[in-house]
Image (cartoon, helix red, strand yellow):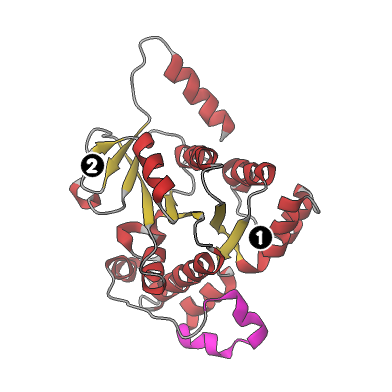
Amino acid sequence: MKNILFILSIFLCAEGFSQEAFAFFTQNGKRTSYRKLLRKSKKADIVLFGEYHNNPIAHWLEVKLTKDLLGKRSLILGAEMFERDNQDALDGYLEGTINQKGLDSLARLWKNYKTDYKPWVDLAKREKLPIVATNIPRKYANLVYKKGLQALDTLPSAERKWIVSLPFPYDGNLSQYEKMKKMARHNPENLPMAQAIKDATMAESIETHYKKGSLFLHLNGSYHSDFFQGIYWYLRRRKPNLKILTISTLSQSNLKKLPSEAYGQADFILVVDEDMTGSY
């Protein structure tokens, strides 16, 4: 990611270069700015930053937003990229009791961790910020995809702490879950259920670790919070009075206009030039 942004900075500083790399829009399609996003974030209880997992601009802005929120209120971080049963390993790294090699061996890190998430995690380590491993272990989501939600009833009690408390509400008619049914080649009914168990688990993790008066910044794929569904929907059901701000990411050639189908996708929509190189 650093190499990509270094190359980008050279182009941006070149004489006569005026091409934008990204732009921000409101949910109504009005052009806005990072400054306004930051101002709104400071007033929120929870910020859900919906990213493209391979987008270096989104990852850079996650680091920048975290830095700009330091010292304003008690800041708590959380991420989809860490699963609940890896919390001890993550805590050990943040506290300095294990090194990067130890984290590599103990946690199931994503393949793009070093380029896309390590700078953010290391920032948290330097600033002594907690990071909550919010996500369900992948094997349980896969179990739901293969056998449905009823398969979770067979789990030993010791393993149930890694997933949302059962039973949990599920609305398969939500538009984002309906889209997943249409995309699925196999088990079309189970695919959105597997997504929902992730969303519900992350929402529960956020609620459990949120402290009144603090600000919780959570990183997740855009689809987990787009159109105020997913994690957002579950948080609203659990804590309707929380002030939740959502950010989404799009990639397209036109940075001057938000497509109509993206209206209502999030409070703030980050549109990145589609020619931006991905991290993988």
Q: Which mark is residue 258?
A: 2
Q: Quadrant of the N terminus?
A: top right
Tell me if I can see residue 162 in this picture. Answer: yes
The residue shown at (43%, 69%) is 195
Tell me if I can see residue 272 in this picture. Answer: no
Q: Is residue 9 left or right of residue 182?
A: right
Of all residues, the one furthest to the left in this rendering is: 260
Residue 229 location (% of width, % of height) = 34, 64
Does 83 sit above or below residue 123? Answer: below
Q: Nearer the viewer, mark 1 or mark 2?
A: 2
In-front residue for pair 78/15:
78
Of all residues, the one furthest to the right in this rendering is: 97
Q: Which circle's residue, 1 or 2, is located before the other in the chain?
A: 1
Residue 82 location (% of width, % of height) = 60, 59
Membership of 158 in magenta stretch: yes
Does 162 sit above or below residue 253? Answer: below
The three-letter amino acid code for the residue at tag 2 is Leu
Q: Which residues are magenta?
A: 149-164
